[in-house]
Amino acid sequence: MFHSVELRAYCHATEEETRVEGAMRCLSPWGVLQMKRSEGHYGNPIVLITCHLEDSGEIAKFWRRLKEAGAIPEIVETLQERVDDEGVLHLRFDKQKAFAGSIDLARVDDVVAVQAKVAAYPAKKSNAVKVALRYLQEV
């Protein structure tokens, strides 16, 4: 079980905002996207696009979507390395492939980053890994 799932992607000046939004929607078509406009060191525009899921139904839909895309086995295989000491599962999906409709764990730097807070008590890595593994095997 997970308390929340947050998706995050940066839209740089060289990218079309609608394309980055499309990549986010590939992972969570029902989520509400929020935009935060900023600028880089040299004044270049940057937009941070986020989507925060807290509803258990939306979180379940997110994991089912990853299962349908075939991403769960690799996540399970690398779970120990992906969970931090605070019980947060970190995932990175290829932003360009997501825009094209494909959900693939990233092997590049241009990503949609996902942080999923595991509902484990006490909130420590070993407990979080066990809870996440059980959940992902049942999704």
Image (spheres, rainbow, N blue to C red):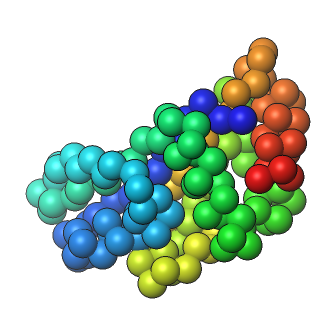
Residue at point 41%, 70% (across, down)? 23
13 versus 55 height, above or below: below
Q: In the rendered image, which quarter is residue 86 located in?
A: top right
Q: Nearer the viewer, residue 136 or 37?
A: 136
100 versus 84 height, above or below: below
Question: How many numbered circles are shown?
Answer: 0
Residue at point 86%, 42% (across, down)? 134
* Residue 81 visible in the picture: no
Looking at the image, the residue that sits furthest to the front is 57
96 versus 122 height, above or below: below
Image coordinates for residue 48, horizontal then vertical, percent: 29, 52
Q: In the rendered image, which quarter is residue 74 located in?
A: bottom right
Looking at the image, the residue that sits furthest to the left is 43
Q: In the rendered image, which quarter is residue 4 located in?
A: top right
Residue at point 73%, 48% (across, down)? 82
Q: Is residue 102 left or right of residue 18?
A: right
**Screen quadrant of the N terminus:** top right
Residue at point 23%, 50% (across, down)? 35
Image coordinates for residue 36, horizontal then vertical, percent: 22, 46
* Residue 114 visible in the picture: yes
Q: Nearer the viewer, residue 47 or 76?
A: 76
Image coordinates for residue 2, horizontal then vertical, percent: 66, 35
Looking at the image, the residue that sits furthest to the top is 122
Image coordinates for residue 46, horizontal then vertical, percent: 22, 58
